[in-house]
Image: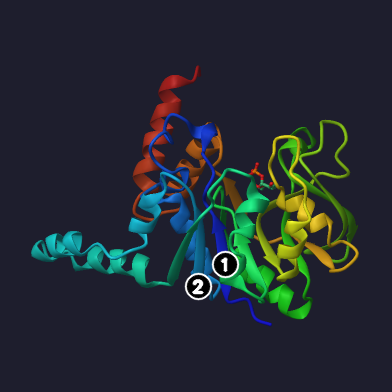
């Protein structure tokens, strides 16, 4: 069955980026000139998905405004003959059907995904985390969807991470099937230092069959009171084949201060309209500040 819907959990409090996120959702922080979540939405649309459910929470109303038409702004731009920007703004609102539901309590990523149950009903679907921006061609999700068509099951994007960082991720263990495919036989959420079964981390893209909802129902909250998506996947190990997919392309984690800044610089350097001037600036800056 084809993947037609994606769920984007965006209810987190963004505490790692405070105070920037005090009154503004972290998903709306700009990366170069567009909010972080727009990159995720563009990846979904580039993968052929036109039905997007964004899981929001209190203080996240600007997400809905961003994916809506801005008629007053459009008339202002029309008066200035800025048709290019009008098209850009309309494309943001009209590229897909956007649905929103609130996660009413901060009970973890697994709980956020379970809020999508009624919207998804009985279909396979994608989950895309907003902290992870993927730059690749074809889009990372499209690569996973292509694999899913040949091999249905649960597909999680995976990537090698430094051993010192394994406690920040869901970590998989299992066996390599091919360059891009890994058969998962176990997984653990944020293992304590020194206990990770591998350095293969789950990064922010997933494809799930609807069975994940029933597994989420059976998943107990962790010590922090959060229901973890990784723990729910683990419950399906003996029932659904689980694959790790090594996508081609690059992932940018925008969840911490340093990675947020470096992502902005790297993605700006990929933009033809900014590349040359930014490079000159960076070279001058480094030349001035570093001892020769
Ligand atoms: C979440 C998941 C984790 C995954 C990570 C990827 O953690 O719980 O399994 O590896 O996203 O970014 P978070 O970063 O929300 O703490």
Are the residues at dot 2 and dot 1 in contact (C-beta closer than 8 Å)? yes
**Disc 2 versus disc 1: distance between alpha carbons?**
6 Å
Identify the residue position indicated by label 2 in the image: 51
In the image: residue 172, left or right of residue 46:
right
Q: Please state the horizontal and vertical placement of residue 90, each as a whole percent of the image.
A: 30, 68
Residue 19 visible: yes
- State the colouring used for the structure image: rainbow
Q: Residues within 10 Å of mark 1 (few under 14, many from 20)?
A: many
Q: Quadrant of residue 84?
A: bottom left
Residue furthest to the bottom: 1
In the image: residue 3, left or right of residue 254:
right
Residue 285 vs 11, above or below: the answer is above
Label 1 near ligand 1 (CB < 8 Å):
no
Which residue: 48% across, 36% down? 261
Q: Which mark is residue 6?
A: 1
Q: Please state the horizontal and vertical placement of residue 196, each as a whole percent of the image.
A: 85, 39
- Out of 107 and 94, give the one closest to the viewer: 107
């Amino acid at each position: 069955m084809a993947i037609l819907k994606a769920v984007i959990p965006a209810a987190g409090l963004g505490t790692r980026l405070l105070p920037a996120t005090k009154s503004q959702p972290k998903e709306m922080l700009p990366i170069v000139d567009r909010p972080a979540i727009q990159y995720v939405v563009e990846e979904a649309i580039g993968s052929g998905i036109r039905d997007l459910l964004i899981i929001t929470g209190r203080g996240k109303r600007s997400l809905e405004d961003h994916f809506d038409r801005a008629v007053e702004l459009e008339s202002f731009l029309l008066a200035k003959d800025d048709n290019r920007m009008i098209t850009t703004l309309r494309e943001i609102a009209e590229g897909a059907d956007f649905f929103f539901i609130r996660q009413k309590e901060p009970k973890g990523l697994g709980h956020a995904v379970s809020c999508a149950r009624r919207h998804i009903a009985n279909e396979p679907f994608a989950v895309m985390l907003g902290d992870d921006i993927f730059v690749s061609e074809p889009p990372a999700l499209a690569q996973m969807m292509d694999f899913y068509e040949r091999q249905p099951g649960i597909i999680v994007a995976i990537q090698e991470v430094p051993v010192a960082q394994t406690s920040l991720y869901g970590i998989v263990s299992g066996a390599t099937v091919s360059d891009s495919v890994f058969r998962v036989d176990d997984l653990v959420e944020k293992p304590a230092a020194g206990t990770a079964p591998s350095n293969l981390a789950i990064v922010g893209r997933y494809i799930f069959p609807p069975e994940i909802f029933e597994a989420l129902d059976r998943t107990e909250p962790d010590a922090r009171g959060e229901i973890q998506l990784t723990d729910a996947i683990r419950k399906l190990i003996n029932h659904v084949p689980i694959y790790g997919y090594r996508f081609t392309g690059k992932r940018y984690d925008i969840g911490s201060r340093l990675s947020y800044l470096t992502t902005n610089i790297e993605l700006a350097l990929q933009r033809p309209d900014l590349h040359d001037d930014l490079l000159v600036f960076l070279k001058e800056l480094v030349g001035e500040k570093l001892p020769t």
